[in-house]
Amino acid sequence: MKFDKIFPFLIFFVGLLVQVTIIPLVSINGIVPDLILIMLVYYSITRGQLYGTVLGAYYGLSVDLITGSLLGSAMLSKTLAGFIAGYFSTETKRDINISTFNFSMIVFLCSMIDTLIFSFFSAFDFNTNFVTVLFEHALLPSLYTGVVSILFIFSPFRRKRLL
């Protein structure tokens, strides 16, 4: 098997280390962007829907095991996010979807799905209103993740693909 197929599985641990240690320093009222999801959307668009689904399952299970959250909640949400992001992986539109603001919109859509499903299983409380859960646990983190993904568009490795 080629190294470029295994690289996203290995870079995950670097991304998770940054997500857990550095990203909380840029939180806004406890809302943090999801770098793992941005990596998942990137690899789902560049490598296809099946690859994104499997990578999302791996990322989600690893997040569940490492962070100690409810086992299976992040796995389900990241798997569905990778599956949805894979829909935007057509041979003619891959470069357009990654190098334009389409990437931020795809990240926002996948982040909404990811945070809705994850918050439904792990952060749902019967004393809170559904609209509050939708706004605080889904919409705001998704917007923040979408805004942070704009930085990826302007990054120097936008022209050359990550391994």
Image: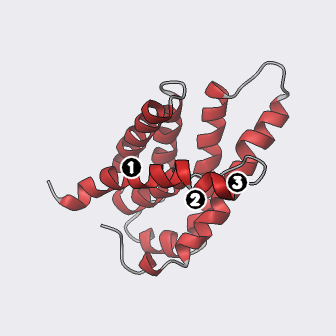
Label 3, label 1: how far apart the Cα atoms are: 21 Å
Q: Which residue is mark 1?
A: 13
Q: Which residue is mark 2?
A: 106
Instruction: Name the foreground residue: 62 vs 56.
Output: 62
Q: Is residue 47 left or right of residue 89?
A: left
Label 3, label 2: how far apart the Cα atoms are: 22 Å
**Where residue 47 appears, x then y in whole percent?**
34, 58
For the point 73% across and 40% down, which residue is it?
137
The residue tagged with tag 3: helix, strand or loop?
loop
The residue tagged with tag 1: helix, strand or loop?
helix
Q: Is residue 90 visible?
A: yes
The residue tagged with tag 2: helix, strand or loop?
helix
Compared to residue 99, the image places residue 133 above or below, namely above
**Colour mode?**
secondary structure
Q: Is residue 110 left or right of residue 87?
A: right
Q: Residue furthest top?
A: 126
Instruction: Name the foreground residue: 114 vs 91.
Output: 114
**Where residue 157 appears, x then y in whole percent?**
42, 77
Q: Nearer the viewer, mark 3 or mark 2?
A: 3
Q: Earlier in the sequence, mark 3 or mark 1?
A: 1
**Where residue 79 appears, x then y in whole percent?**
46, 39
Q: Which residue is mark 3?
A: 27
Mark carried by residue 36: none
Please name the amino acid that badge 1 sits on.
Phe
